[in-house]
Amino acid sequence: MYPEIALASASPRRRELLQQIAVPFRLVQVDVDESRQGEESPTAYVSRLARAKAQAGAAKLQYQLPVLGADTIVVVDQHILGKPVDQADFSRMMQLLSGRCHQVLTAVALLSQHNSQQCLVSTEVCFRVLCAEEITRYWQTGEPCDKAGGYGIQGQGGRFVSRINGSYSAVVGLPLCETDLLLRNWQEQA
Ligand SMILES: Cc1cn([C@H]2C[C@H](O)[C@@H](COP(=O)(O)OP(=O)(O)OP(=O)(O)O)O2)c(=O)[nH]c1=O
């Protein structure tokens, strides 16, 4: 049903999500500088990173396959939260997220030599109020360190989430509905 693609990602979640909708893929390892450029907006930043991952993968594979790249960030009051660098950074993030709603932005880019498509999905996630003790305990599980915003909705972090409005799979790292559409559009144009 889908074209064979390469996934430019080291994220086990993105791998599992693509498998969930039966997309045939191989992996390509890329190393992309994730620093923000000046006053770049959150949407510009996350979209650029998804594109940069796909571009790096396509160059590495010499454009033999379409390459999919994705990026996820958490945004609260225009602050961009990536992965926490240490426990203090993580605690700061949890205090920002406690007792309120934030946006999770996931961008997906699909790229070949002659075609490029991308989409951006924004999901609202609401947290109940968190206390200092559970924030410390959550850090000790090891789960937060490789997740944007310092939490995994699909893991123990799910206990903090009171409500979500939008795409659950986008929060975990790859929006299934929009990725399916991207791939089907791609196939129609090929
Ligand atoms: C908010 C949230 C994020 N995440 C993950 C999704 C992404 O893997 C990660 C955000 O970092 P990213 O830089 O988007 O991705 P990554 O470094 O894990 O993988 P890649 O090689 O594709 O760049 O946070 C969850 O797993 N659950 C959540 O609830």
Image: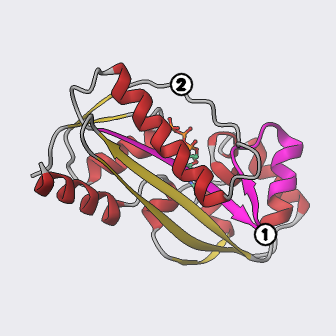
Q: Report which quarter residue 93 is drawn in.
A: bottom right
Position of 40 with respect to 190 (left or right) is right
Q: Which residue in the protein does label 1 denote?
A: 77
Q: Position of residue 128 (x, y in %)?
A: 74, 76
Label 2 packing within 10 angstroms: few (<14), some (14-19), many (20+):
few
Magenta stretch: includes residue 129: no
Identity of the residue drawn at 64% across and 69% down: 103
| Closer to the camera in the image, 68 or 84 | 68
Q: Which residue in the protein does label 2 denote?
A: 31
**Residue at the front extreme of this rendering:** 114
Label 1 packing within 10 angstroms: few (<14), some (14-19), many (20+):
few
Q: Are marks 2 and 1 in contact (CB under 8 Å)?
A: no
Q: Report which quarter residue 42 is drawn in.
A: bottom right
Q: Report which quarter residue 102 is drawn in.
A: bottom right
Identity of the residue drawn at 70% across and 54% down: 149
Q: Amino acid at mark 1?
A: Asp
